[in-house]
Amino acid sequence: MNQQNRRPTRRRRRTRLSVLGIAVVTVFIAALLAIAVYFIFRFENPCQSQTSHVETTPAPTLAPTQTPPHPSPGPDATTTPEDNNNNETTNNDTTSASRFAAFSFFDPAREEEYYAFAARRPELTDDEVVWMVNVHLNQENFYDVIFTIPATDTMPLLVNPVWRLPDGFEPDNMVGVNNDDDNIVAIPEAVAAFRSLRSASRAAGFDLSITSGFRTAERQATLFERQQPVDTSRPMAVAKPHHSEHQTGRALDIWGPGSGLMDSQATSSADLSPVGTWVYANAHVHGFIIRYGYDVTHITGFIFEPWHITYVGIHIAQYMHDMGIRSLEEFVGRNPNATIANFANPAAR
């Protein structure tokens, strides 16, 4: 009886042990699977997270010291149109600006014009580019774009194919060159300076005279019409009305004894007569410049005229002579705020 009762108990124990073992194994296997899933997720998720970060985070910007230098070709470099476009789109950074900013007459507002003109005229030096653009000589032809002189009571006045006098302009208080009844008139300062020049020329053995002084715009229009047609791509012999220095009352056409100022049709200062050579060497001492020199016709817009002198004042004339500045355009381009008053004081220049 007791043996029979013990046998079922043993069977139940074995059954329990089997179920318990199966449960333990099942739990162990489930744990292993959970761990495997965890590590699979652990290793795959950072890659996905990193990819998402790269796609959504903006690229970092370079620090100023990491900015590549602006390509600035030198005076002898040839710049292609593509290069010029690159220059014009990036020339507002500090590296680009430094190419022209070293010059005291640099105008930041015109930097794009500097780069465009430098690309078109690679034979020019950077300082030539700056002063020429400053006075609007970056045009293809003379008279392409015209500007009106903003102030007519300052000295000197830059009047040329690009810069015109205002309508109705006429100097006040002009006087006769030789006497009050003389038909040839000019501003008093120019007349006094010519008398000083003539006195010095007489002491040197030459007697100078004036053939033309102030002209009205109407008189200039008549002279201009006589030379039609006009090729505005080349230096001219007669200015358009309002573009003539004679209308300022500061320009004089002078003549000397014998053959005047030239021995032949002058193409350089070597063709000048003795009196012409003397005027070239001494005009600045009395406040005049030879306005239309033989080597700056492409700047002034006019042919070589050794007889045409312009009053700019002793200090400016002397400065131009000492610095080797050969045209009024260059002087104004380098000294945009110059007047006789501030040039009389070297410290104010």
Image (cartoon, grey):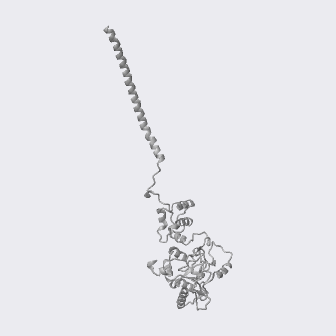
Q: Is residue 307 left or right of residue 93?
A: right
Residue 312, position as x, y percentages in the image: 53, 81
Does 231 appear above or below 41? Answer: below
**Residue 35 sits in which quadrant?**
top left
**Does the rendering let one see residue 37?**
yes
Q: Residue at x 52, y 75 (%)?
A: 332
Q: Residue at x 42, y 38 (%)?
A: 43
Residue 208, position as x, y percentages in the image: 57, 88
Residue 50, position as x, y percentages in the image: 45, 43
Q: Residue at x 41, y 37 (%)?
A: 42
Does 14 appear above or below 288? Answer: above
**Residue 173 sits in which quadrant?**
bottom right
Which residue appears farthest toward the left when viewing the image? 2
Residue 213, position as x, y percentages in the image: 60, 85
Image quadrant occupied by the N terminus: top left
Please count the marks in the image: 0
Residue toward you, 119 or 191: 191
Q: Is residue 342 left or right of residue 19?
A: right
**Does the rendering let one see residue 255?**
no
